[in-house]
Image: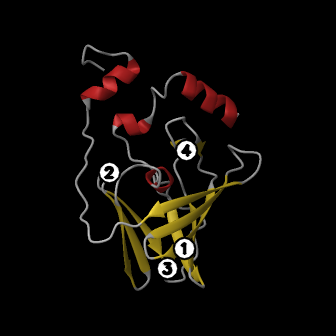
Amino acid sequence: MAADLVKKRTADQSKDDPHARCMPDTFLRSYGLPHIQKFLQSPGLLVMLDEDNANYRQVFTDGRPLPVDPVPAWNGYSSGTWSGDTLVVDSIGFRDDLWLDMNGTFITSAAKVRERIRRPDYGHLTIQVTVDDPKAYTKPWTITLNQRIVVDTELVDEICVENEKSSQRFSGNTSGNK
């Protein structure tokens, strides 16, 4: 099922990509976009700020368990704990059909995501992500992302606004009407 849908979305040149329509991205997709992210840590809470559409994510690090029935959200609900020098973050409670890339790879409301975030040296971050989504995939899959840390920088507003004119070309609508 998932493979067929991704093939269709790729063949359609991702014309229904929510990112191109100014919809929020999941944190998983944000890791792969060329935008700066800033992590702010306080006792019991890690806040991840993303300059793309001024998106944010909360990771509770105060020991609370994941909720049994979370309200579905773009970034889900996240709880993290430290295992040595690695932050292990478990997330659930996603909206259905959230795109992870421009090919249309997706997760559903049944997804459980585990991130293992580690800083191997001063200038880098390694993020290992495992997605377990029985509604979309036959088995869990894992990807490792190697990120460069940019220190002493500021986030820049990059806002995609409603009725973005460039998104009309994706749907074949050039008249400006929806």
Indicate the position of residue 16 as horizontal and vertical percent values: 46, 29
Number of residues whose C-alpha sits closer than 10 Å to that of mark 2, classed few (under 14), some (14–19) or many (20 or more): many
Mark 4 in CB contact with mark 1 (< 8 angstroms): no
Q: Which mark is residue 52?
A: 2
- What is the three-letter code of the residue carrying label 4? Asp
Of 10 and 150, the residue lying toward us: 150
Indicate the position of residue 117 as horizontal and vertical percent values: 54, 70
Sequence-wise, the earlier of marks 3 and 4 is: 3
In the displayed structure, does residue 90 sit left or right of residue 71? right
Report, in whole angstroms, how far the alpha carbon at label 4 lies from the one at label 2: 21 Å
- How many numbered marks, from 0 up? 4
Give the label, 3 or 1, closer to the camera: 1
Number of residues whose C-alpha sits closer than 10 Å to that of mark 4, classed few (under 14), some (14–19) or many (20 or more): some
Residue matched to label 3: 61
In the displayed structure, does residue 23 sit left or right of residue 4? left
Quadrant that contains the N terminus: top right
Q: Residue at point 68% right, 34% down?
A: 3
Report, in whole angstroms, how far the alpha carbon at label 3 lies from the one at label 1: 15 Å
Q: Which mark is residue 54?
A: none
Quadrant of the image occupied by residue 175:
top left
Residue matched to label 1: 118
In the displayed structure, does residue 23 sit left or right of residue 90? left
Mark 4 in CB contact with mark 2 (< 8 angstroms): no
Indicate the position of residue 34 as horizontal and vertical percent values: 38, 50
Report, in whole angstroms, how far the alpha carbon at label 3 lies from the one at label 4: 26 Å
Residue matched to label 4: 96
Q: Residue at point 49% right, 24% down?
A: 13
Sequence-wise, the earlier of marks 2 and 1 is: 2
- What is the three-letter code of the residue carrying label 1? Arg
